Every structure is written in C-alpha cells, then in structure tokens.
C-alpha cells in the first residue's frame, strides 16, 4: 500500500502527509466525553474497544493521513512488572536495579495484548489510504520514569548511570529488548509505521546521548527490521543538540527523524534531509494562537521543506487548550499548499 503517508518514505515530495502527536486526546470534546464516563486514563488505554474509538476520533474529524494508536509509553514498565498507577499523572514505584524485573519475553505480550487488539480493531475500521502508527517510549526515557523521575526530571536515571554504569546498562538493554518486541507486536497487529519517543533526550552529554540513546535505538531498529524487514521507523530524540540529531540520523538506522520545535528547519533539510525523512516541527503554541501566526509558521515550514521527504507534524504533542478551529485551519493550510 503506497498511500500518501507511506509514499513519502519512497520519495514522494509534493504535498506532505499530516498527523499530530497526541492527536487523540484532551483537546477533543468527544475524547473528554469518554474520559468523563470511564474516569481512568489507564483503563482507556488498556480497553481495546475504547482505545480504538479514541484512536479513530481525530481521523474522522480532521481526515489526518495517519492514526496513532491511543496508548502510553508506560505500558513497557507495566509489562516488566513495575508497579504503576494513574491519577492526574502516572506514578511508578522507583527501581534501583534491573534484577527483579520480568525478563520473560513470553509474558510481555500478555500485558501488552490490549494494545495489539486495539490496533487490529483500528486497522479494520480505517479508510483505505490512511496509515496506522504504533509507538513506544525509548529506553532512556522509560528509564527516567522507572527511576523516580520523568522526561523532565532525568536526575535519578542520570545519577544511576554515573554511579553504576554496568547496572544501568542492564536496565537499558532489557528495555531495548522489550521495546523492540512491543514494536514488532504492533507491526504484526496491523501498524504500518512505528515511532520511538525519546522525550527525555535533551540535556544529556554527548557521550551519554551516544551510550543511552543512540546505541539502544540502533539495537531496537536492528531487532525490528530482522522481524519486519519492511517496517518504517520514526525516531524522536526530543531536545537533543543539533549534533545529537545528526548522529542519531546517521547511526540509528531509523527511516525518519521527528524534529522538536527548536530545530532550525533549514538546517534539518540541509543536514538531515538526504539521510532520512523529516517530520515536524510546528510549535504547538502557534497552533493554539491560530490566525496569522499559525499561517506564517506553517508557510515557513512548507517553504523550507519543499522538495524534501517530509511529514508535517508538531514539534511536540498538541496542547489540551488548542481550539478545534485552529486544527481545521492547519489541515487546510497544509492540504492547500502549492
């Protein structure tokens, strides 16, 4: 299937395909209605029929070129046996060793099965020509949560990596194995593309980025490609340096790199555009603003990426207070690009 989204991986460079990170979520009234009925975010993620419906909501409303399964990066820690709860924010019981985590690959699919079932349901209901994206958190980002911090609080993971690099490597290696298996499971269930979210990549030293982000991602890509040679893989090392983006694109083997808001799009086209498909990087706040600010921001990205293999997206997830009319404006601006 060479639809508009998948076509970009094969060299299509005219009107870019369009989707948004967190496109199924709190800015949509139909999502808020379901959340009010069910209450638990985790229950929504782990109930296939509900997750499938939420996945399809933004595609029905806006006609995006891809759906991304409604799930969460923390399904991986859950599969490894980490105690997890959700209230207003996720809470994990911090770990200080990988020794007690569940290493049984036969057990992981039991916890992760609702995600695969949701993908099967979405696949059966998507209109022809609409792609389906699966995803997982990257090992480093997952480690930041599992050690008591998070994507914006990587301190505990960083300290463990400094104090006990061999022990920390055991955790990263286990996470890489589980992430690879999860991505393979999603592809087998019907996903066309998978994305690896390294949301905590910013602020790492160059050596730490190479050791804990680039190398594990390359391991994941190799494992996924061995099981699914035609798989299309997007990587998102959010917040890393320009040199980090360049090394990530060169050394991981991903097909596409998603760009955060701070990356100069002209630099990305010139430096990365010949190596990988580019994705991004509209400021989510420009989408909240709408109007002339949004139109100018979209036009700048479209002009810079003309003739480049490019997927239009945000530089991070859509914000909950984004007006529906501004998303409609975005879709019109991208689709009417000359």
Image (cartoon, rainbow, N blue to C red):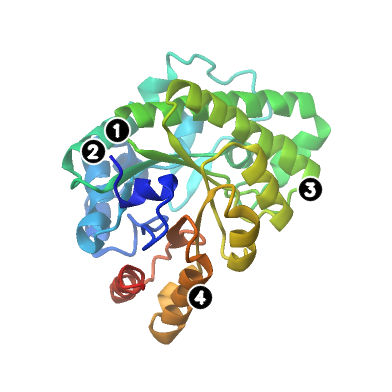
Residue tagged 2: 123
**Do the residues bearing badges 2 and 3 touch, measured as CB atoms within 8 Å?**
no
Residue 190 is labelled as: 1
Name the residue rendered at 62%, 63% in the picture.
Answer: 263
Query: Vertically, is 129 above or below 288?
Result: above
Question: Of circles 2 and 3, which is in front?
Answer: 2
* Residue 109 percent location from the top left of the image: 39, 21
Name the residue rendered at 36%, 45% in the picture.
Answer: 6
The alpha-carbon separation of the residues under discs 1 and 2 comes to 6 Å
Pick whichever of labels 1 and 3 is earlier in the sequence: 1
Residue 140 is labelled as: none
Pick whichever of labels 4 and 1 is earlier in the sequence: 1
The alpha-carbon separation of the residues under discs 4 and 3 comes to 31 Å
Residue 206 visible in the shown view = yes
* Quadrant holding the N terminus: top left
Taking the image as shown, residue 239 lies to the left or right of residue 301, namely right
The alpha-carbon separation of the residues under discs 4 and 2 comes to 34 Å
Residue tagged 4: 300
**Do the residues bearing badges 1 and 2 touch, measured as CB atoms within 8 Å?**
yes
């Amino acid at each position: 299937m060479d639809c508009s989204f998948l076509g970009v991986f094969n060299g299509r460079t005219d009107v870019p395909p369009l989707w948004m990170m967190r496109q199924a979520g709190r800015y949509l009234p139909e999502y808020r209605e379901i959340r009010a009925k069910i209450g638990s975010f985790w229950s929504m993620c782990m109930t296939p029929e509900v997750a499938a419906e939420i996945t399809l909501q933004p595609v029905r409303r806006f006609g995006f070129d891809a759906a991304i399964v409604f799930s969460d990066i923390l399904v991986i820690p859950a599969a490894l046996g980490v105690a997890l709860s959700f209230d207003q924010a996720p809470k994990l019981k911090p770990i200080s060793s990988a020794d007690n985590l569940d290493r049984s690959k036969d057990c992981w699919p039991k916890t992760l099965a609702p995600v695969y079932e949701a993908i099967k349901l979405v696949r059966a209901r998507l209109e022809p020509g609409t792609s389906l994206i699966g995803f997982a958190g990257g090992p480093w980002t997952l480690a930041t949560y599992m050690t008591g911090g998070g994507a914006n609080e990587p301190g505990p993971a960083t300290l463990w990596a400094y104090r006990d690099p061999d022990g920390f490597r055991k955790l990263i290696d286990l996470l890489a194995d589980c992430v690879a298996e999860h991505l393979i499971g999603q592809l087998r269930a019907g996903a066309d593309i998978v994305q690896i979210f390294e949301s905590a990549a910013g602020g790492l030293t160059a050596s730490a980025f190479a050791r804990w982000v680039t190398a594990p991602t390359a391991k994941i890509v190799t494992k996924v490609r061995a099981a699914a040679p035609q798989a299309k893989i997007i990587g998102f090392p959010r917040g890393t340096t320009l040199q980090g983006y360049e090394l990530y694109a060169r050394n991981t083997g991903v097909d596409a790199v998603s760009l955060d808001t701070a990356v100069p799009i002209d630099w990305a086209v010139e430096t990365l555009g010949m190596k990988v498909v580019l994705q991004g990087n509209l400021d989510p706040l420009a989408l909240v603003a709408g109007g002339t600010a949004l139109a100018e921001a979209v036009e700048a990205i479209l002009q810079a990426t003309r003739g480049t293999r490019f997927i239009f997206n945000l530089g991070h997830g859509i914000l909950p207070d984004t007006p529906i009319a501004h998303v409609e404006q975005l879709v019109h601006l991208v689709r009417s690009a000359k």
